[in-house]
Amino acid sequence: MSIAQTIQNRVSDMPAGQVFGYQELPEYPQAPLAVIKAVNRLVADKSLQRLSKGKFYIPKKGLLGQRRPSDDELIRSVLYKNGCLRGYITGLALFNRLGLTTQMPRTVTIAVNGGRQEKNFGTISIKTVITRLPVSEENVPLFQYLDVLRDVKRIPDADINQSIRAMKEKLAKLDISDRQRLVQFAVEYYNPQVRALLGLLATTLKWDEKKLLKTTLNPTTTYKLALNIKLWPAAKDWNIQ
């Protein structure tokens, strides 16, 4: 069977609205030029639509004509490259997904192991920011929790005490292995405020890992977060005000 016929068969088996790139087609490593030519031919005859450079999708048919991929699929197309996870949702979209704010952003921020860019897909915009974190499926939830602690003062329409309490509830569900990795990531990649807040939560949750966090902080530095000390009596032990 020719490359062109093989690609056509693969595309016909894909669900409508799925976004993919050349590299996700198994034939690409052995015959890149033939694959590119076959895909471009499918675009020319309207079997495929071009989403952006090197990205394509099978158009959906709706009452008003062809529809673009869903917002979730557009986000997935940025999160993954060549079938591998390379980033994670952060910022306002993350706060909303974790139930920390009711605000729905039109621009979704994604931290990626790659370059900065912003893409407007019409219904949604996606902005990427650079991260040096070791992104993987198992690490992403931990990075997202730490990102919340880093940006906790910037969560719109939210009381910081309620946000910290919500994070306490999420951290309480972590097993020993995950909480050890969480603390290690905080020590290696995040700023002192994050480590202090995590130390406060570790103290409240009676984690032994609080000792390691304590050794990484300057004892003369204070962190002004406007916490209610009555709700968080251990805050003074971490110089949090």
Image: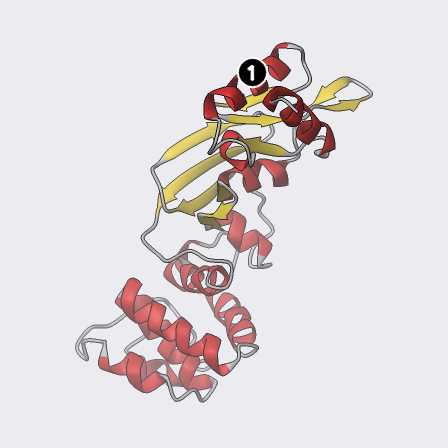
Residue 189 figure quarter: bottom left
Instruction: Indicate whether 204 appears above or below 133.
Output: below
Q: Is residue 45 toward the left or the right of residue 237 in the image?
A: right
Q: Quadrant of the N terminus?
A: top right
Q: Nearer the viewer, residue 20 or 36?
A: 36
Residue 75 figure quarter: top right
Query: Where in the figure is residue 202, as x and y percent of width and height?
Result: 42, 82
Q: Quadrant of the C terminus?
A: bottom left
The residue carrying pointer 1 sits among few (fewer than 14), some (14 to 19) or many (20 or more) residues within 10 Å by Cα, namely: some
Instruction: Indicate whether 191 appears above or below 97.
Output: below
Question: Can you name the residue that lies furthest to the top here?
Answer: 44
Residue appearing at x 56%, y 42% in the figure:
76
Question: Tag count in the figure?
Answer: 1
**What is the three-letter code of the residue carrying label 1?**
Asn
Q: Nearer the viewer, residue 182 or 26?
A: 26
Instruction: Indicate whether 165 appears above or below 14.
Output: below
Residue appearing at x 67%, y 10% in the figure:
45
Residue 197 figure quarter: bottom left
- Label 1: which residue? 40
Q: Nearer the viewer, residue 161 or 22?
A: 22
Question: Can you name the residue that lies furthest to the front here?
Answer: 1
